[in-house]
Amino acid sequence: MIRFSVMTLFPEMIEAGVNVSILARAAANHLLDIRAVNIRDYTDNKHGRVDDYTYGGGAGMLMQAQPIYDCYQALVNEQPADRVIYLTPQGRTFDQEMACELAGEKHVVFLCGHYEGVDERVLEAIVTDYVSIGDYVLTGGELPAMVMIDAISRHIPGVLHNEDSTDAESFSDGLLEYPQYTRPEEWMGKKVPEILLSGDHAKVDVWRHNESLKRTKSRRPDLYDAYISLHPEETFQ
Ligand code: ADE
């Protein structure tokens, strides 16, 4: 079972995000264990203070090293951490490959920053990976941690009941997924493509692959070019 520990000042935000739907079911089935730990519980001052002014001046407050380090120690005393991830726009950009790789770990710890950031010394002491979820700035690391937990969990066997669903989906072969349809056959004058009703699985597969190529070319030309350079013989009509 994989454990995700999230060091945060807002554990209720993590709990609200992960205790629903597929992640809640996976936790109930002991496929994963998600813990939100309040950094404030580890302050060594009676005011519960976790932040202070920046040396050298400048606007805003920084999270102090001591509560974060003590929180980290408590977590790793229970179970050693394979990875300690600091969520920051300065990190490497999270992607499907990283999600798949992290799904093989046993204990992944996330550190969520707030205010203007975190004292550099504690980052140097504990962090193994600096990760960003995209080139924009959020108010804290909680949403990025939840995004990562969700994307990683989908790669853990048994979390998705239909084992096929990670194979055909977007990115698994470097292409976006083809369009899909369910009942009714006609909706607002729009018909389901004829070939999908034919029962000819080989033809359906060809059609789907072609649609994947078409969609990837128009929506993500960067992915399309990368795919075609690996498969130069492939084009679509
Ligand atoms: N914290 C603030 N913005 C972030 C981002 N884009 N990715 C990860 N952590 C962040």
Image: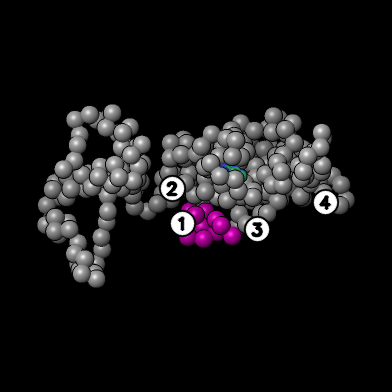
Q: Residue at x 64, y 33 (%)?
A: 127
Mark earlier in primary sequence (4, 1): 1
Q: Main secondary structure of the magenta part?
A: helix
Q: CA distance from mark 4 to mark 3?
A: 17 Å
Q: Secondary structure at mark 4?
A: loop
What residue would you read off at disc 2?
154
Question: Which stretch did the figure color magenta?
Answer: 16-28
In the foreground, 54 or 114: 54
Residue at the spot of label 4: 48
What residue is pinned by disc 3?
12
Residue 22: give its label.
Answer: 1
Res. 152 visible in picture: yes
Q: Are marks 2 and 1 in contact (CB under 8 Å)?
A: yes
Q: Is mark 4 within 8 Å of ligand 1?
A: no
Amino acid type, callout 1: Ile
Q: Judging from the image, what secondary structure is the residue with disc 2 in?
A: loop
The amino acid beneath tag 4 is Gly
- Nearer to us in this view, 233 or 96: 233
Q: Nearer the viewer, mark 2 or mark 4?
A: 4
Ligand 1's quadrant: top right
